[in-house]
Image (cartoon, rainbow, N blue to C red):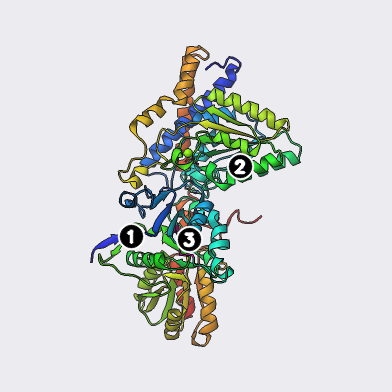
Amino acid sequence: MPRKTYIAAVQEALAEEMRRDPQVLLIGEDVRIGVFAGTRGLHAEFGDKRVIDTPISELAVAGAGIGAAVTGLRPVVDLMFGTFMFLAFDQIANQAGAMRYMYGGQTNVPVVFMTQNGAGSSAGHHHSQSVHQFFMNMPQIKVVLPSTPYDVKGLLKSAIRDENPVIFLNSLSLGGKRGAVPDEEYLVPLGVADIKRAGNDVSICAVGSAVYTALSAANALAKEGIDAEVIDLRTLSPWDSDAVLESVRKTGRFVAVDESFPTCSAASEWAATVAERAFHDLKAPVQRVNNKDVPVPFSPVLEKAVLPSAEDVIAAVRRTLE
Amino acid sequence: MDHRDIPIDVILDIYTRILRIRRFEEEVGKLFRQGQLPGFVHLYIGEEAVAAGVCAALTDEDTIISTHRGHGHVIAKGGDIKRMMAELFGKASGYCKGKGGSMHIADFDIGMLGACGIVGGGIPVAVGAGLSAWYSASERVSLCFFGDGAANEGSFHESLNLASALNLPVIFVCENNQYGEFTPASRAMNIEDIAARAAGYGIPGIIADGSDALEMYRIATAAVQRARAGQGPTLIEAKTHRSGGHAEGEEAFLAGQQYRGEAELAQARAKDPLRLLHTYVAEKDLIPADQLESLDEGITRALREAVAFARESPLPEVDSIYDDLWL
Ligand SMILES: Cc1ncc(C[n+]2csc(CCOP(=O)(O)OP(=O)(O)O)c2C)c(N)n1
Ligand SMILES: [Mg+2]
């Protein structure tokens, strides 16, 4: 199977969906140039009408995506960095995340808001926050955060075909990551987890770049004979609680690894669900591994220190084994 | 241009600010290319006359707010290049103890309320600084810099209207370098002059030649007087250009794509604000050439010291991630 980068897989998914469905279009700041390469080359193929560079006006652009979606198009709105979503928050929360329900099912809102999530570029707080957890708090919004080139392509294609608003988050730090991506068409369904490493002693759940933190912890633990299972949720909302509960019933131990601020994080939700629904299968208290509870600092030494590390995960696993 | 009414010491002061910014940015560009600086840096080369002319019209009590392209604003307001450089290196001795970086330098002691990585993010905050000046019946004015791209954010429009409705001492300085990243302003708005937007909010909108530092000074001085006299906000649009890229190292992510022609770039560089002011000063024989030369030498020396200071400064302690969280 050919090996491609994560961001090249994003580009392939967009190109394939735009070829397949003339209602799909791309709108956002500098999508022609493609600051993160995910949208690069699409303007040459699809032209001005379907690859639309916009002014720096996130609120209006997000809202325009919603308006176009409720009138028959399937827009992909590119918001570049996760934190720029905050400027579009009103339209996403108050419009996209409510319209179908609030208007009694009269419409669907097939719009994708795509951005880069998380830290890793040492650019300071305004370019380094994770935002997935904010959108998990909205009932009518789907949230996707893939970790591999294979997943990002298959999930983005599914997101574009989905009838609901989807926040599609590319992991900022994984853009150059390579992995197997078939040339043949495939889809990865939203809402289905993937076991990235099978194991029997402890269940470690993660998304996005945190999957690699979990995997490196699992590899280190394997050397001591501790056999960790790593579950990549891939979709955060709706999330595959069945897969997680099944794993926990097997291992009896649960560690949630999530690159976001601890309070009301994705990890909080997973941990609460496991405690609620698999309490009697647990041999130890659930553990959460998050960012340190501070804004993301600029200096690389500090940035690294606030993000969850493999050592943090190993320590959390040890706590479940005490 | 004719600026006979501007005293020589003010001209020399403005010239010094421009030169200090230019040399600082040249050094930062070099350090970035050598891979010594983490993160992104957006240089201000070509636009120096705006910050220098405008900040020369302010007192130390007046406040400014800046952007992602903020080094020039900090220096023009009187910032310390040692602490700036240390911040760019991510060192504990930097302005923000290594927590801010290039896009987040602040010096509250000199009224520099912060650079900002969010386009348009500083504009509403500047209205608040104007509110507090008005509330405390202070002479202070609040000024903010932002780009042509930022003028398309809701924050710009809401802020102009709010400042106008409350008649606050706020000066909005739009640095129209004709690009937001790689998109020309001509594709992002259907007007030539952002200053025209002021009319929609009932405030003056003034167009200035952003490569003419003395014109910037004169126009800013008038806006400051208006604000201090309780006559409310002004929008100044400085027509300017950046002579380099949007961000250093952008060739890597442009991957061969072009967004600005060589001819346009050459035209822009021909309006170099440092050279223009230098020529003006020389032609009018205002400041002796050897004085300008030794000024340059002094700045170059100070920069060398700043880089050495930044290099030799320790990295922040990892435990410092919890400092400055709560008071
Ligand atoms: C809210 C927001 N949207 C997008 C960006 C990405 N971005 C960084 S600088 C920039 C261009 C800003 O253009 P302009 O305001 O004209 O300032 P200039 O860079 O030309 O000085 C963009 C789009 C951002 N930092 N913040
Ligand atoms: Mg600009």
| Dominant SS in magenta | strand
* Residue B112 location (% of width, % of height): 60, 39
Q: Residue A318, percent across and down?
A: 46, 76
Label 1: element kind: loop
Please state the chain letter of the residue tagged with numbered disc 3 in the rendered image.
A
Label number found at residue A177: 1
* Disc 2, SS: loop
Seen from the viewer's position, the closer of residues B235 and B98 is: B235
Q: Amino acid at mark 2?
A: Leu
How many numbered marks have been drawn onto this rendered protein structure? 3
Which residue: 54% across, 65% down? A97
Residue bearing the label numbered 3: A71
Residue A229: within the magenta?
Answer: no
Q: Provide the residue span drawn in magenta.
A: A109-117
Q: Compared with residue A66, is residue B220 higher up or lower down, i.e. above or below?
A: above
Give the Cα distance between marks 3 and 2.
Answer: 44 Å
Give yes or no for contact between labels 3 and 2 (Cβ–Cβ under 8 Å): no
Residue A302 at x, y percent in the picture:
49, 55
Question: Foreground residue, A175 or B181?
Answer: B181
Nearer the camera: disc 3 or disc 2 = 3
Q: B224 or A205, which lies in front?
A: B224
Chain for numbered disc 1: A
Quarter where residue A181 is shown: bottom left
Question: Percent x, y for residue A145?
Answer: 43, 65
A146 vs B95, left or right, is left
